[in-house]
Image (cartoon, rainbow, N blue to C red):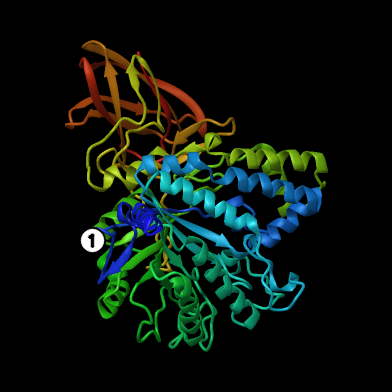
Amino acid sequence: MKRVILLSAFLLSQFGTSQLLKTDGQKIVNDKGENVQLRGLGLGGWMLQEGYMLKTADFAGPQYKIKEKIAELIGEDGMNEFYKAYLKNGITKQDIDFLKKAGFNSIRLPMHYNLYTLPIEKEKVKGQNTWLEEGFKMTDDLLKWCAANKMYLILDLHAAPGGQGNDVNISDNDKSKPSLWDSEENQKKTIALWKKLAERYKDEAWIGGYDLINEPNINFTGKNPNGTDEMSNAPLWKLQKDITEAIRLVDKKHIIFLEGNGWGNNYNGLTTLWDNNIAFSFHKYWNFNDDATLKFALDLREKHNMPIWLGETGENSNVWFTELIQLLNKHNIGYAFWPMKKIDNIAGITNVKITPEYQKLLDYWKNGGEKPSKEFAKKTLMQIAENYKFSNTEIKNDVIDAMFRQTTDNSTKPFKNHQAPGKILATDYDLGRIGSSYSDKDFINLWVSDPAKRSEWNSGNQLRNDGVDIYKTSDNQYYVGKTEPGEWLQYTLHSKIDKAYTFDINYASDTTGKIVIKDASGKQLATFSLNSTGGNEIWKTVSAKGINLKKGENKIRIYFESEGINLKYFEVK
């Protein structure tokens, strides 16, 4: 009797006081029956790298090709040493603590099967599954960090044995070997892996669910190579059903997430569901944020009376992020943004800093020339692995602000603590929505909705993820460029006293132009008539006196009344 009571207490501690997820009609709920909207981030780039994440896309897209390039320079042992450090540093408890503090409540883990089991080509006995501790240990640690933060962990098989589609980068697909769909062995290994994972995590309440196959993209019978025109998708539904049945032999509690063909969005041929604890995962990139783009997913939810989850999205501007989350909130749809870390990017919540030495490796791999020494290449790559540590990344506060505060709050916040007198960089304009902290005419990256017109939203692609075009000079300074009439930037300044200040504007332009400074109410404070400086990066300074700032907080706006004015900074004296 005592043992039964202890076991019951253990189960209660695991589930009764925690937040085990399940489906309830069209909602995802916890064990108290409360609606849970998953606000998540996908840890893309950790267990599985795509070329664009490491800036190798031009010559090495799938991970196995990236590894070949690295081994070519530092040998197989050196490559393994790099990846050991890369995986160790890529995600740590610090990362998860930070994500919780930022406002996320869930994590999507994109898994590469080869961290959990051997490829079929390397199994000594055909049909055997050799289990590798590395992937399971990484998952155990991640789950522990998530549980400590009361965050859900959703397991996502991002690279299935053999690869699940013709978009080779996303699943590390080596076309010289049998794919998931061409090989019964690969399918059996996939099923066995999921059963093994379910056995290990069946009693873990902070496991949010199992995302069975990421973004299948394959033409079983159709003409489109990525499966967007498939009508039955029979092999896809059969395999996901077989995986579900294997999971349910050991785990009857956790949600199963299904993904359709065509990168997750083609659900043709799915007539009935084989389990009552299923949710659908769709993906959304580079299209409009309106009800029309969600219609197919909302219809799916209604038809099957099951929840939908936006399992992957991102790679866009802050404006797009804010608008998308507002749309998802309206429809009670959870989400997982993508990805966590990339080298030299502005659209993620963190940036991994590139180094000049790594750029030399990239240039060699792309263009050839003199081969870098083994010592130089290894030192360079180990520094990149070091840069993946959370403490060495650059936090993108503008992205975080857009994903959380700006979804409900139209006010502005200072980007930095600007004091008068003082020097204010043009790139340090306030945090806030477009129309509140800045105005720019190009601010969203759209091309799926209208493929003929891929919009440009940040031509400079530096520092911040708004529409404001930020560029880097040859001596590694930053400026706001590609300005157009009607665009403006707002800055919050603090003055210790009421005072009439002098403003110095540092600008460059190859034409004449005009800048006007106003306060946030629209009152004009100063006008600057600008002569050509002789070039877009030839900098000159002009001054205006008698600009009144009150004691305390002042919000001022710099308006561009002509195009082609590049602004580096202004100084308040």
Image-quadrant location for residue 164: bottom right
Residue 433 versus residue 348: which sits nearer the camera? 348
Question: Which residue is located at x 71 percent, y 40 percent?
Answer: 380
Residue 108, image x, y percentages: 45, 57
Query: At 29% from the left edge and 22% from the top edge, which residue is drawn?
Result: 493
Residue 164 seen:
no
Question: What is the residue that sits farthest to the front in this orientation?
Answer: 1
Q: Callout 1: few (<14), some (14-19), or many (20+) C-alpha neighbours within 10 Å?
A: some
Please give left or right for residue 373 compared with residue 410 in the image: right
Q: In which quarter of the image is the C terminus?
A: top left
Q: Which of the 4 quarters of the picture holds residue 466?
A: top left
455 vs 490: above or below? below
What is the x, y in percent for residue 399?
Answer: 39, 44
Q: Mark 1 points at which residue?
A: 33
Which residue occupies 69% across, 69% down?
119
Q: Nearer the viewer, residue 293 or 189?
A: 189
Total residue callouts: 1
Quadrant of the rendered structure where residue 50 is? bottom right
Residue 540 place in picture, x, y as percent: 46, 24
Query: Looking at the picture, does residue 390 appear above or below residue 26?
Result: above
Please indicate whether residue 144 sits to the left or right of residue 179 in the image. Answer: left
Which amino acid does the dot numbered 1 rest on?
Gly
Image x and y of residue 402, in percent:
33, 45
The answer to whether residue 134 is seen in the rendering is yes
Please identify the quadrant where the N terminus is shown: bottom left
Is residue 554 depicted above or below 27 in this figure? Answer: above
Label 1: element kind: loop
Residue situated in front as seen by the camera: 143 or 218: 143
